[in-house]
Image: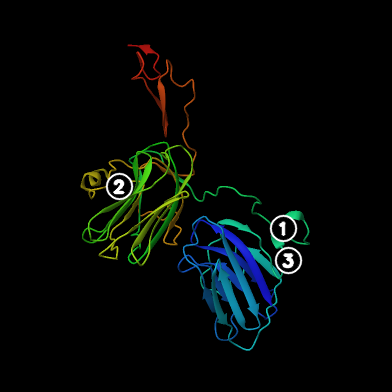
Amino acid sequence: MLNRPICSRPSWHKGELIGGRDEGKGIGPGVWRGVPSKNSPELYSPPHGKGPETLFAGQKLNDNEWHTVKVVRRGKSLQLSVDNVTVEGQMTGAHTRLEFHNIETGIMTERRFISVVPSNFIGHLQGLTFNGLPYLDQCKNGDISYCELNARFGMRHIIADPVTFRTKGSYLALATLQAYASMHLFFQFKTTTPDGLMLFNSGDGSDFIVVELVKGYVHYVFDLGNGPSLMKGNSDKPLNDNQWHNVVVSRDANNVHTLKIDSRTVTQHSNGARNLDLKGELYIGGVTKNMYSNLPKLIASRDGYQGCLASVDLNGRLPDLIADALHRVGQVERGCDGPSTTCTEESCYHQGVCLQQWEGFTCDCTMTSYGGSFCNDRK
């Protein structure tokens, strides 16, 4: 019997969650992996002459919330449970024995029985037990004879593959976003600039999608052919605070649109057309200068986004934004250093107001009798 519960907190769509590996015993490995077709964990059992068995459970689990996964096998019977959803299956073939020599979390090194190797898992794991043995706890406490570790214990904010758009005229152009029947996008951003276009893809007829920052708040604008609609994030304060924020934009098969900013969510049901028929390039961080004046109504942006983007997940595809770009315009760089100079109490004289910018700061001297760059020149 195999009985294995585990809690995971993924932010991204794909990634190896946990796997087992034998050492050439001829039994074949049992592999459990978080590589969903609809953001759901997948149970892959080893081939026994008739190909692998695969079970799916759950959906939209890359929401940065905790989820519980449990795998049970008794003989040829398989059971995969995700939170309160359970699916069952049967192994084919004559063999029922699985012999494990290594257990891996977060990465798959055994590749003999799969055609496509999944991405490594990015997120948090806790409570991993295998046949009653708490392996993560044993590894942490040194109570196991062998444990190879390059992950970290404890909670921390995970930022994956950040890039910086240093100017408002910088942008990347990627292949068309595939969002015809449904969509699930995730990314993180950090900026000090209140306005800017983050993402845009046009389409057939009037179809388009936009995510932008307007006065520090995230806007999601879309048109499936019924006219443009606007959804505004309900953050309790502007988000151009030089802190990382999580954004989820999704649309399901029932045309329910969801915009989630950090832990705050808004939803909207769209009637009429159900398909988003996008064409052309997906613009990240901005568009060409001559496109702004021709953008569909309800789009407020007249400049590009200035700041950092990270952990971009486009319907389960984790692009390397710079390497995968069809076009790269302006100053787009790997990493995220943030503003070189930040506001302090001494930045502006005579009670001038310091305004943080991405490339430094400026002083607002309008409520003083002084002028100049630092409000130290008498008018």
Circle 2 residue: 287
Residue at image position (22%, 48%) is 297
**Amino acid type for the residue under numbered disc 1:** Asp
* Mark 2 vs mark 1: in front: 1
For the N terminus, the quadrant is bottom right
Sequence-earlier tag: 2 or 1: 1
| Secondary structure found at label 2 | loop
- Image quadrant where residue 316 sits: bottom left
Circle 1 residue: 137
Percent from the top left, x then y, of residue 27? 67, 80
Where 86 sits versus 265, above or below?
below
| Secondary structure found at label 3 | loop
The CA distance from mark 2 to mark 1 is 49 Å
Circle 3 residue: 133
* Mark 2 vs mark 3: in front: 3
Residue found at the very far top of the displayed protein: 378
**Amino acid type for the residue under numbered disc 2:** Val
Percent from the top left, x then y, of residue 313? 44, 57
The CA distance from mark 1 to mark 3 is 9 Å
Sequence-earlier tag: 2 or 3: 3
- Determine crowd level at label 1: few under 14, some 14-19, many 20+ residues with C-alpha closer than 10 A: some
